[in-house]
Image (tube, rainbow, N blue to C red):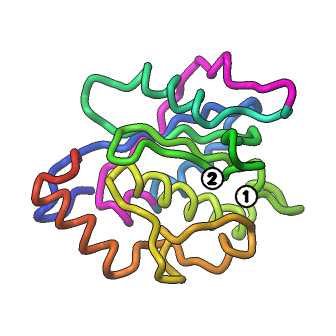
Amino acid sequence: MERAGLPASLVRLWWIGEAPPDPRPLEDLAAHVSRVFERTVRVDTVPERPGDAYDARRRQFSSGRILQWLVGRLPEDGSKVLGVTDVDLFMPVLTFVYGEAQLGGRAAVVSMARLLDERGPRSAVVVARLAKEAVHELGHTFGLLHCETNPCVMSRSSNLVQVDRKGTTLCHDCQVRYRDAVVGGGIEP
C-alpha cells in the first residue's frame, strides 16, 4: 500500500526464530508496519538462521551479529528487512535489547523473547508490544532517531512499563521527519 508522495518500496519480515513461526502475529505485524510507514510489507520464509550469534557465556544472542547476518542476505531489490525472532538479544554494553537496527540502513532485528506475557505470543498485549518495537527499529532504518515525546513509538524503552506506555505510531514530528526525508531523498526508501 503506497500513498501519494512516497516512493514505492518493500519491507520484508523474516522469521528467524528457533521455534516454528506463528503466522498470525507476523501477519498482524505486517499490517501494522504497512499502515505506519505506508509501504508494502511481505512476510517471507527464510530457511537459514544466524549461526554464529549465540554467546554461550551470556546465554543470549548478539543483536549485532544477527544484523551482520541480515545485511549479508539483503535482497538486491533494495527492500528493507526486519528479522523477527524469539531468542533473547543483547548488545555488549546492555543486559538485553528488544531489537537493533542500522541507522539509515536496510536491516533491523526485533525479539519477542522479553515482550511475552503469560498469555503467549497471540495475546493483544504481546502483539502490541511487538508492533511497537518493530516500528521503532524500522524507524531507525528510515533514519529516525530516538524521540523525547513520550507516546511516540520512537521513544526509548528499557523495560516493559516503558514499552507499554508508548504508542504504536510515530508522533507528529517524527511523521514529518520521516515523510520529509523520504520524499526529499534524504533516506533511501
Residue at horizontal 89 percent and vertical 62 percent from the top? 118
Segment colored magenta? 33-57
Report whether 111 appears left or right of 27: right
Residue at horizontal 32 percent and vertical 54 percent from the top? 143
Q: Quadrant of the N terminus?
A: bottom left
Question: Which x, y percent locates residue 16?
Answer: 62, 31
Q: Is residue 53 above or below residue 111?
A: above
Label 1 amino acid? Arg
Residues at circles 1 and 2 in contact by the CB criterion of under 8 Å: yes
Q: Is residue 94 above or below residue 157?
A: above
- Mark 2 closeness class: few <14, some 14–19, many ≥20 residues within 10 Å: some
Distance from label 1 to label 2 (Cα)?
Answer: 6 Å
- Mark 1 closeness class: few <14, some 14–19, many ≥20 residues within 10 Å: some
Q: Is residue 2 above or below residue 168?
A: above
Question: Which x, y percent locates residue 73?
Answer: 43, 21
In this view of the protein, which residue sits in the foreground, 55 or 170?
55
In this view of the protein, which residue sits in the foreground, 55 or 17?
55
User: Element at badge 1?
Assistant: loop
Q: Which mark is residue 25?
A: 2
The question of residue 79 being in magenta is answered with no
Q: Which residue is mark 1?
A: 122
Question: Which x, y percent locates residue 26?
Answer: 57, 48
Report whether 115 appears left or right of 48: right
